Image: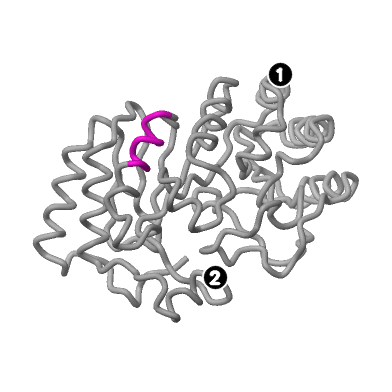
Amino acid sequence: MRYYGSVYRPPSEARSLIVQVTYGCSHNTCAFCSMYKEKRFSIRPLEEVLEDFRIARSVYHHIEKVFLADGDALVRKAEELYVILDAVRDLFPECRQVTSYASPSSIRIRTEEELRTLREKGLTMVYMGLESGSDRVLTLMNKGHPAAEIVEMGKKVRACGIALSVTAITGLGGPELLERHALDTAAAFNAMNPEYIGMLTLMVEPETPLYDWVHQGKFQLLTRSQVLEETRLMVEALDSPGSVFRMNHASNYLALRGTLNRDRDAMLAEVRRAEEDLGRLRPEAWRGL
């Protein structure tokens, strides 16, 4: 396959065919994010996209999952997305899942009719970054959208039949906003009731504004005990029946997994055990993105 620059995908897309539909991220100014910094956002020529799929068909005998990269595939014209999805269906009849990242901006420009058509043509799920349910945290991190708008766009996706996977980041508000970040993030998840909830733990990447703030003393990172406290507050407040909850990313100190609300108490018990014994946590040197 032909790739331009660094390519990122969700952990669950490890075995997917990845084809760049766009290059970079249409926002790309979040203070904590180091992704896509080496390239400007652009729309990849449609014929190149289709050619990559044809190349993949000639190379791979069986493809069940396809991920449309880079950071914001849904900003393409709806008619072009239809062509891409038709090509996937025609070339890979065995394919059972097509996914992409989506931003609140790209969801907003899609009409409900367009989203339903995308689902009919095979787009099964989108990944959207909430990061925090707190507007103070979102403003600090230059997310570009208030929490209410992110929630609205998540609900719009689900209403149109497309599954939704939403991520947030523990520690993103620092000690000052620990409680607000935890409770407001839980409230946002509850309002969207997505199929999947994913939690990462903040890691500071070089060449980001957050990296500079930390080294200038303008932003204080949570201690491991504070990360557990924030996690406990958030899980206690979660009320999102049926959502699959995963906090097992390489960045996390503590691995949690379950289905809400059924497994909430078991996950809380695991957090409390870790609070009593920090030796249960992943060592700092083992964390990664």
Residue indicated by mark 1? 113
Residue 27 vs residue 280: left or right? Answer: right
Q: Which residues are magenta?
A: 184-191
Residue 196 in picture, x, y percent from top left: 43, 37
> Residue 76's spot in the image, x, y percent?
78, 40
Please say whether residue 189 is one of the residues in the magenta stretch. yes
Between 202 and 12, the residue placed more toward the observer is: 202
Is residue 19 visible from the viewing direction of this image? yes
Residue 111 higher or lower than 66, as above or below:
above
Asked whether residue 65 is in view, the answer is: no
**Quadrant of image for the N terminus:** bottom right
| Mark 2 vs mark 1, CA separation in Å | 38 Å
The picture places residue 38, in percent across and down from the top left corner, at 71, 70
What amino acid is labelled 2 in the image?
A: Pro
Magenta segment includes 243:
no
Q: Report x, y in % for residue 13.
A: 55, 49
Residue at coordinates 75% horizontally, 36% vertically from top-left? 88
Q: Quadrant of residue 119?
A: top right
Nearest the viewer among 130 and 184 is: 184
The residue labelled by disc 2 is 209
How many C-alpha atoms fall within 10 Å of the one at disc 2: few (<14), some, or many (≥20)?
some
